[in-house]
Image (cartoon, grey):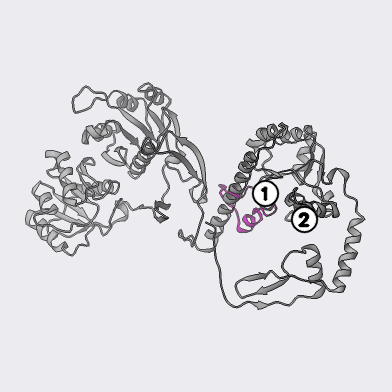
Amino acid sequence: MPLSLSSSPTAAAAATTAASGAAHRFLYPHRPCLHRAGKNFVVLAFVPCRASSVARGLIRGMADVETQKAASPSLLAGHKQALISLSDKRDLSLLGNGLQGLGYSIVSTGGTAFALEEAGVSVTKVEEITHFPEMLDGRVKTLHPSIHGGILARRDHNHHMEALSRYNIGTFDIVVVNLYPFYEKVTSANGITFEDGIENIDIGGPTLIRAAAKNHKDVLVVVDHKDYPAVLEFLQGKQDDQHFRRKLAWKAFQHVASYDSAVSEWLWKQTEDGDKLPPSFTVPLSLKCTLRYGENPHQKAAFYDDKSLSLVNAGGIATAIQHHGKEMSYNNYLDADAAWNCVSEFKNPTCVIVKHTNPCGVASRQDILEAYRLSVKADPVSAFGGIVAFNTTVDEDLAKEIREFRSPTDGSTRMFYEIVVAPKYTEKGLEILRGKSKTLRILEAKKSEKGMLSLRQVAGGWLAQDSDDLTPEDIKFTVMSERIPQEAELQDAEFAWLCVKHVKSNAIVIAKNNCMLGMGSGQPNRVESLRIAFRKAGEEAKGAALASDAFFPFAWKDAVEEACQNGIRVIAEPGGSIRDGDAVDCCNKYGVSLVFTDVRHFRH
């Protein structure tokens, strides 16, 4: 989805001199010769041009000079040639010597040529073919008909081969190119100036790659050093394989597309003051692994890394290190992401247990072991087989507690988990957790950065939005009721409010003393979610705080009154209903505190 910016005012004709036009048509005989210019754009009108007698004389004179230059016999059509120009020179010696051993003449540029010669490979430098030196600080090296003609010529078109013979241009059978390290430069810890960023945009490399990929029937294009052994093996074979060629061509175009997406993303940030929603953009995805199946066994699935510049060092489950256990599944990634995003929002030592992307247990304590026990206690049935996440180091004591803790439902069943996620583990902690189960997935993750762009697919399109980064510290809790909540009650309301943000709508959370007591999620109406939360919290709900992710549309004989009748002491909700007055009156009747946040936390 490349950036597409256009204008449509009437173009004005631009004058050109006869001499410059003739020279242009000599160098580029099939290019447009009529230029139209507008205020914000340039149009090239493709029309046939005929050279004047003066121009024809100039062309003949230049052609006579060219024909006097004898091309190197090894570079004429019919000889096997490879063009190599690399920024990343890993395994270059393997490739160069391998190609030379197969009878290929090597043509190369600058530092690549020097590295090949150091490896004992005979090299013809590009300027020996173009009869033109590298110029403009290296900006122009390979942009020449003697190079691109040899790449783009179709071997099955006689007039193509006749043209090469006429101008003493040799064919290239292999093009091996990778690009300036733009991605690494603009994401380096030391930063980069705008001017340096521009200079690290590769021009000649993408042009070579695209040319070779387009003509892949005759030219092998290679952009990845990992493909060198396969390419050498292919060249040793006696039969051509167009499927192999097409795969390399696909990889080449994908390589250039990802490169261009990084340049586009970087330039947008330089021009639009960091606006996250450009008119168009490309998301560069790189396959990390294939998965056993998707959400269900009949669905194929894979996991991709997002290589957007904005996500470099941004943390999250995608970059987590797996220390132990079975391979991650599609659902594992979703649940681990939900657990990690939730636990990372708490400042105090916290444990979060998630099942089907909903937190079923959350507790914060200075003693992380106690926080873990309380998280399980909130809903031990749901916690069994869930994902447990911590925002502190898992040491020996915590690992033992995770391994040995028994379910509160019967006091004997050892708790089972799919995944443990934490920012760090001690060596002993890891050793103990590995002993709990061969399948237990142990992930070490970095806290996700805030301010990310959130993408979600719908049929035929994508939704984009800022990530929901607001926490209680960013929100003003406005007291609407006659009763003012005590400090401890307000803290309970803030804790419940942070928890409810991570529960699927319609969402209700009941909490007290920095511990989730019960939650109701995903119900079509708010009353049902409230009743589920009370059923889980039981008698502990008396004197607790209740948070709702959105306003209550009704109060009397509805959710607000039920909450008051069940002993809730403070309710936190966004407000915004036309019946907010009813909610205030209801809370006043029962002596319950009501606070508005003016912030909604829908999660679909």
The answer to which quarter of the image holds residue 96 is: top right
Magenta part of the protein: which range? 181-205
Closer to the camera in the image, 487 or 199: 199
The answer to which quarter of the image holds residue 248 is: top right
Position of 29 with respect to 549 (left or right) is right
Position of 474 with respect to 216 (left or right) is left
The answer, for residue 134, to whether it is visible in the render is: no
The answer to which quarter of the image holds residue 412 is: top left
Residue farthest toward the right in the current orientation of the protein: 68
| Residue ID for mark 2 | 144
Quick one: label 1, few (<14), some, or many (20+) residues within 10 Å?
many
Closer to the camera in the image, 386 or 583: 386
The answer, for residue 239, to whether it is visible in the render is: yes
Q: Amino acid at mark 2?
A: His
Q: Secondary structure at mark 2?
A: loop
Horizontal and vertical percent position of residue 500? 26, 48
| Residue ID for mark 1 | 209
Position of 320 with respect to 562 (left or right) is right
